[in-house]
Each structure stands twice: as structure tokens, then as C-alpha cells.
Image (cartoon, rainbow, N blue to C red):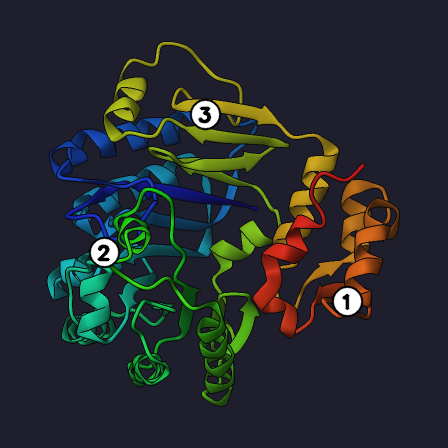
Amino acid sequence: MYSLYIHIPFCRSRCSYCDFNTYAGQEGLIGRYVEALKEELRRVAGAAPRALPVHTVYFGGGTPSLLAAKHVAEVLETVARRFSLAAGAEISLEANPGTVSPRWLKEIRAVGVNRLSLGMQSAHPTDLRLLERDHDFFAVVEAVKAARSAGFRNLNLDLIFGVPHQAMERWQQTLNLALGLEPEHLSLYALTLEHGTPLAHWVGRGLLPAPDPDLAADMYEWADERLASAGFRQYEISNWAKEGFACRHNLQYWRSEPYLGFGAGAHGYAEHIRTVNVLTPAAYIRRMERADREYEFPRSPANVQARRLSPREEMEEFMMMGLRLTEEGVSAEKFAARFGVSLENAFGEPIARLVGLGLLERVGDRLRLTRRARLLGNMVFREFVGGA
């Protein structure tokens, strides 16, 4: 089964912490951009050896909620015509709480979107101002209420912790208020200072304190306990869900299963090939409007990179992605079936070292992070990169 990622790079304004491939003030391109998306979907699907089975579609951004419902409908109609879309497919869309209306939510639910991810980030106005979010908590409450009224029964809230000047009590209040909205899923991310962002610049100039990693760790551990008591299961380092509501699209990434990326800056992975699209919306539109030849699957006219990964690279990525799954981890049986070599033969030394350090544990046939290693994930993942 395949997954489709559709990148919508438009934003009304750019948040202070964001280094994603997003662009403010270019909403005038949306119509042509949607046409380019449909053309890329048609071309990649047409180059495939068969009608590809698809079980998840994800509109990410940027701010996909800037699309008119008719644009979402056109993209999904193209997907349905060109791919074999599974009955009950998970179709997700990210939304900024300040950009949605009850009518729009009803319209996108009617055309097939069945999972909504709202960028709440915080319930506190000070945090939201610092992050340069253009909504407040009351907009989140109204968006959730309207989403439920529109028929959404699968709702995620994104939250950020470790924000400068954010005390533990403020974080606890944010998470408790989020739980009061009764989402099925929560994604919790520690704030990171990304190069070139306003927030990194402010910290670099001494205008703000740097994030406190010890406090952030305490916030993470408290959140894990609080969410467990509220009936949420942590299934990935940054993600918690009620039973049956783990994000199927993101599980596709973490299990290193094939996905196709469409739109400006989108990445894909299929047939052992990693694809990367041109970054800017204008360049993406030009490439799709001027495309004059066929491309071999999974390549597209929008690609600036299409590189075949070596078996070793695929094994490394399988480990790094799979170990993010806190319960599932990496199955030795699945690894051997996929790569024709045992997990121990491929990575015996780093595994033994990390088990000895108490960062990895064996549970049956599975290898997974220990609880304390969830705060040290990147250190663990690096052990599986660049080996012989």
C-alpha cells in the first residue's frame, strides 16, 4: 500500500520558529498551484506499472486550510481517478485554527477529508505571541467545536513545549486545556531553534533565553504520565493517541513503507528511490506547466533529486525511523525478511553498545528504545548511520 503526501506551501504569515518550506503572501498562486498538483498526480500515477493502491492521503504545509474546499475536492478527485484509493482511506489535512470556518469544515468533510490536525501549539497568549501564531486559544475552541459539528471524529492537536519563559505550570495548563477539548490524538514537540528563523536570531542576540533542555525533559516526562492517565497511548516519540487513532499516514514513514510526495519541496520514497521536488511554488508551477516528456516511476518533472538508495542506506533509515516507534520498535524478523540479512549481522556492534548503556531493550523479537532513551533519540539514531 502507498501513501500520498501533498504539500501546500502557502501561509498568511511565517511563524517565528518555522523552517519548513513555506511562503507568505503568495496566495495568488493557489489556483495555478492546484492545477500543477493535479498534473503531477496524473503524471506519476500514469508512469506506475499499475493502479497503485493508496490507503492514506495527507495535506501538509504550510497552511492547507488556505485552500478553498473546491481545490481540496479537485485534488482528491484526481487521486480517486488515478490511484486505487482504499475504502476507508485516512485523508488528513493540517489547519491553522485562525483560518477555518464552520462552512469550510463542513465542505471539506463532505469531499472526503476525515482527519483534521489543528496547530494549537499553546493555550497561553504569551507563548502564541512569541511563536508568532495568528490565533488564540478561543479560536482553537471554536475550531474544534465546528469540526465536531461538521462530522470530524478523528482530531489531532499539535502542541509545542520548552518555549522561552514557559514555566512548567503554563505547560501543564496548556496540556490540560487541550485534553479538555477531547482530541483523539496529540502531537507534542519540543521547541528547537532552527537556523535562520527569527526565534533563533532573537536567542542569538540575547533577546530571549535559550530553551532549557532539562526543563523540556521534565515537561515531556510529565506530559507522558498525564496523557497515560487520560487514556492516551504513546506510540511514537512525539505522538500519543486514543486506541485505534494512531496516524496511519505517519506510521507509513516510520515503518519505511512507500510514499509519494507531491508539491513544492515534497519528498517521496518508492522503488528504493528518494525523490525531492523543487522548493518554490513558482518554480514548481513552471516545471509542471512546461513538462514535455514522460518520466520513469516514481520520478516527476518537479524533481530536483531522484536518487537510488543503497541497501545499506535503506537499512540505516529503517532503523532510525523504526526506533521512533516506542512500542513497536524494529522487528528482527521483518528486518531479515526485507533485507536478507539479520539485524545482528547488520548492526550487532551498535545494538550491543546501546543495550549495554540502557538505551535499547529487546522485547521478544523487537528492538526498541528504553523509556529514558526517548529523550535521547537522536543520539541513539546516529549510532546506526555511516557504519561499515
Relative to 210, say whether 151 is above or below.
below
> Which one is nearer the viewer's eye here, 111 or 202?
202
Relative to 139, say whether 2 is above or below.
above
Where is the C terminus found, in terms of image quarters? top right
For label 3, the crowd category at 10 Å Cα-Cα, with few meaning under 14, some 14 to 19 and many 20 or more, is some
Q: Residue at x 76, y 63 (%)?
A: 367
Amino acid type at image mark 1: Leu
Residue 343 visible, this orientation: no
Farthest bottom residue in view: 229
Residue 208 position in % (x across, y down): 28, 61
For label 1, the crowd category at 10 Å Cα-Cα, with few meaning under 14, some 14 to 19 and many 20 or more, is few
Q: Quadrant of residue 163?
A: bottom left
Residue 57 position in % (x across, y down): 41, 49
Among numbered discs 3 and 2, the one appearing first in the sequence: 3
Relative to 11, say whether 87 is above or below.
below
Amino acid type at image mark 3: Gly
Among numbered discs 2 and 1, the one appearing first in the sequence: 2
Q: Residue at x 32, y 64 (%)?
A: 209
> Which one is nearer the viewer's eye here, 10 or 129?
129
Q: CA distance from mark 3 to mark 2?
A: 26 Å
Q: Which mark is residue 357?
A: 1
Q: Which mark is residue 8?
A: none
Q: What secondary structure is found at the residue carrying circle 2?
A: helix
Relative to 167, say whether 307 is above or below.
above
Q: Residue at x 23, y 53 (%)?
A: 15
Q: Which residue is mark 2?
A: 108
Q: Tell whether label 1 touches label 3 (CB within 8 Å).
A: no
For label 2, the crowd category at 10 Å Cα-Cα, with few meaning under 14, some 14 to 19 and many 20 or more, is many
Q: Which residue is mark 3?
A: 46
